[in-house]
Image: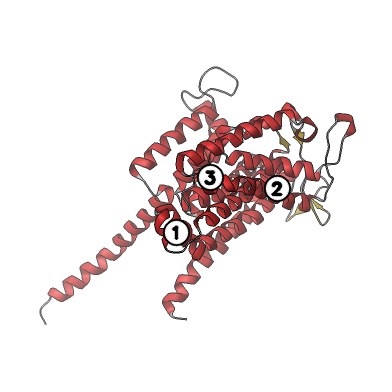
Amino acid sequence: MSERASRRVGGPLIATVAATAVLLAVPFYVDAFWLQTGLFAMSAAIGAIGLNLLSGATGQLSLGHAFFLAVGAYGYVYLASDSDPGHELSGLGLPAPLAFVGAILLAGIAGGLFSPISGRLRGTYLGIASLALIFIGQHVLFNAEGITGGFNGRDVPPMEIFGFTFADSPEFVLFNVPLGALERLWFLGVALLIPAIWIARGILRGRPGRAMNTIRDHEVAASVMGVPVARYRSGVFVLSSMYAGAAGALLALAFRRTVPEYFGMFLSLDYLAMIVIGGLGSAAGAVAGAVFVSVLPQLLTRYGNDLPLVAEPGSEGVSPAEAARILYGAAVVAVVLFLPGGLLGLWARLRVAATRRRSAPTLHRLDEQEEQPA
């Protein structure tokens, strides 16, 4: 392997190892607020990666992403919970890891059932059709009380893997740091996020990614080139739904309770904002957008008292959640107008500018040497 190729492979690998090490060290140094905020961001990142594969890479507009998150969240709760005759709640009582995988598969099956529609519709028509999933899902979540708990929702059983419970008890201490539910779930979130990024990058950089991008850019040309357009469109919809299912199950574990109101249309719009702000068509862009959109409301909630025009939740005025939506709504407009590549595109521009600045003195010295007489 040449030196340039080794550098090309070694750089991202070192960066990945360093980022993973930093993520694994976070629970030992930050408090519960930042851990919960980070868990929300990791869950959102997984869901946003799936939506970016669908909308950013393949060009399919979906406004029903929240429906598949709800399938993942409630699927995990139903599969992992025991039946509770006292509260007329049913459940299968499966082992938690099996329930988690089952929730992802349930979301994939739901996406597969919708895939014949997604294979036929395009653009705005597909967006409107997927929006219907939100209304159907909300009706089911509020009325199927034996499964979902109705308006009040259901408690979420903790994850348990080989006897290790992701909860506050029993007490577990590592390096003199007590690890509660949030710390343990943080490690679970990292273990889910990294393969989610890795799989998406592999898809986008391989033959499927090129086919998806061709479908997005010119569907007729893709068909002429031999790309099975309908099969790709359906397959990506199922894959995106499975990503949303994993995000929903992780979100349920972080919240520890599922409530139907959360999985409404605003959540779908949040996810669209994530992929637009972060950058369409890339896993890194989805992660950047998810962090921006997820962390902003939490920061405004915590530091809203020190900011003008932001009122406390429940009081008159602009709440932190509303202020966050206004801000990242403005960010979406700014990105569309000035940064078509999103935050990832901005990062690429900064890197190019820094490289040019570093290389400028060298070129200047070479020019001076050439101008000197022999």
Counting from the top left corner in percent of width and height, residue 299 is at: 54, 35
Which amino acid type is marked by label 1?
Ser
Q: Is residue 118 above or below residue 303?
A: below
Residue sitting at the far right: 85
Q: Residue at position x 55%, y 51% from top?
A: 49
Query: Which residue bears the numbered disc 3?
Result: 290
Q: CA distance from mark 2 to mark 1?
A: 31 Å
Residue sitting at the far left: 373
* Element carrying mark 2: helix
Is residue 226 rendered to the left or right of residue 25?
left
Which of pointers 1 and 3 lies earlier in the amino acid sequence? 1
Counting from the top left corner in percent of width and height, residue 68 is at: 63, 42
Which amino acid type is marked by label 3?
Ala
Q: How many marks?
A: 3
Quadrant containing the C terminus in the rendered view:
bottom left
Q: Is residue 17 above or below residue 373?
A: above
Q: Residue at position x 47%, y 23% from top?
A: 309
Query: Which residue bears the numbered disc 1?
Result: 223
Query: Which residue bears the numbered disc 2?
Result: 106
